[in-house]
Image (spheres, grey):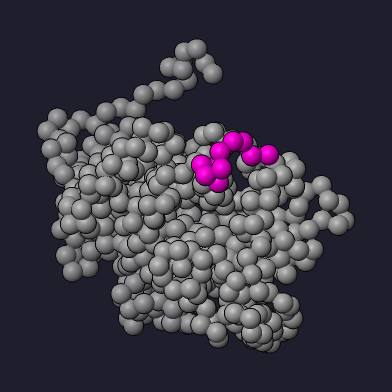
Amino acid sequence: MLKNPASKYSPFPPVRLADRQWPDRTIGSAPIWMSTDLRDGNQALFEPMNIERKMRLFHTLCDIGFKEIEVAFPSASQTDFDFVRKLIEGQHIPDDVTIEVLTQAREHLIRRTIDSLAGARRAIVHVYTATSKPFRENVFGMSRAEVVDMAVSAVRLIRQLSAERPQTEWVLEYSPETFTATELDFALEICDAVTAAWGATPQDKVILNLPTTVEMATPNVYADQIEWMHRHLARRDSVILSVHPHNDRGTAVAAAELAMMAGAERVEGCLFGNGERTGNVDIVTLALNLYTQGISPKLDFSDINAVARTVEHCSRLPIHPRHPYVGDLVFTAFSGSHQDAIRKGFGVQNVDDHWRVPYLPIDPADVGRSYDSVIRINSQSGKGGIAYLLEAEYGVVLPRRLQVEFSRVVQAHTDSHGGEMSAAEIWALFAETYLAGETPIRYVEHHLFEHGEAQGIRLTLELDGRVHLLAGEGNGPIDAAVHALRSIGIGVQVRSYEERSMAGKGSDANACAFLELARAGCNRECHGVGIDGNIVTASIRALVNGVNRLSASAANAGGETRAA
């Protein structure tokens, strides 16, 4: 690093806005949310989502409550084009949801984009041009006037092509890419030219999206930029002012919140901050920040664990354990004084009272987390090295959430028996807890078969001493087994699945399967573990062991004795 960074980097110039209003404003309602998980989030992945994963995430976004979803960049790849067609032709788009697609301001790309939307009920066409001086001079070699002409020509073409398809309700969105590095007077000029070319009216509004394509300044500067545009735009009553913050400086959430105070009505972002480089603004954090202030976010994160597992599956990216509201450790207290304060807070908290439990900005139950997940034991709280000993001595690498769950089992054991536990004792406790259960169900055997594109299973179990031969089909062996169990009234949901080989065993290595299960319609979760030379058998054993543990948990809580 340079001793004098000023020799290379310049501070961002302040906006001349002496009478700025946003510092005295508060946020009173949720913005229009637009999820770009399937576009900006997807293009930033090592392995972009296939159509199956994109479809799963699309339906999840709809279930959460998003009404605008940017689904693809259809002119960029055949996969994206085909996904848009699948959404439309398969009638996957709810009536109250509008899909959005992105295109550059080039004629052949615009035509391809409009073609992808044929038959859509309503669609947002999002066109962009880079507007900052480095792009104009070094990338495009264009003058200001030429860049304006490029944007206006694109808008006129979109208007012409959309008029030829009157069965679709068309909405225009325009982004001056690199807005935060663009001179404000030029950003205003090109945005006004776009709304004029479209013929924007209060009945046919244009979405003007002002992105922090790269976050370059403090959030207050961005708020100044947004308020300046908000106050100077022509046809302001015919514009929906949108923001698209990125997180290059680590302040995207603050930038979005201040931008809303400055006049923004719409926010584009991704679940858990996925997206290019450091990511897009995290819509989950923004939404739940509103929720903790008594404002309905108009998005439903009642089962945030399920949302998180879906996003992790679809994106192939883990969520950080310290991630606001959803990380595995955010409702965790390792400090004894914190634990004491939390327990006392819960002791006096009444259901109908305003929330006032120390150290917890939100009731974990509101997002589908239980009180049991609040107080956990880590590997350095007096029971250290549990996961290390299991891996070093037995070759079992526990998923992190299972480490947390099992640490509570170890804690309870040491509290009741006292003393330290050896590696052998820890392994014996692990096997007793996760591998030895045979009630009410005992696994006997299984056979797999193919049925068209589905995976079938014939599963032999003992249930309360009686042998049952079950059959089921699904998209894989585990899903098929879950469906088979439903035939005897056992309903469970698989929240996560991981598999490991037991290290250091060579060709005779066993496979370990780990399933995180929940009872259907219940937030109570626990793990099932299976070990076998065959990974499928290990997975089925993990499922059965997990069902038995759920049944025991329900019985201990005074509920049903089965997982149904």
**Residue at (20%, 53%) from the top-left corner?**
350
**Residue at (23%, 37%) from the top-left corner?**
224
Which quadrant would residue 19 be assigned to in this image? top left
Give the x, y percent position of residue 21: 13, 38
- Of 361 and 348, which appears nearest the observer? 348
Residue 502's place in the image compared with 474, above or below, is: above
User: Residue 419: within the magenta?
Assistant: yes
Q: Residue furthest right?
A: 507
Which quadrant would residue 556 be assigned to in this image? bottom left
**Residue at (19%, 60%) from the top-left corner?**
238
- Of 139 and 65, which appears nearest the observer? 65
**Dividing the image into 4 quarters, which one contains the N terminus?**
top right
Q: Residue furthest top?
A: 3
Give the x, y percent position of residue 465: 63, 81
Residue 189 visible, this orientation:
no
Give the x, y percent position of residue 69: 39, 64
- What's drawn in magenta, residue-wise? 413-422
Residue 169 visible, this orientation:
yes
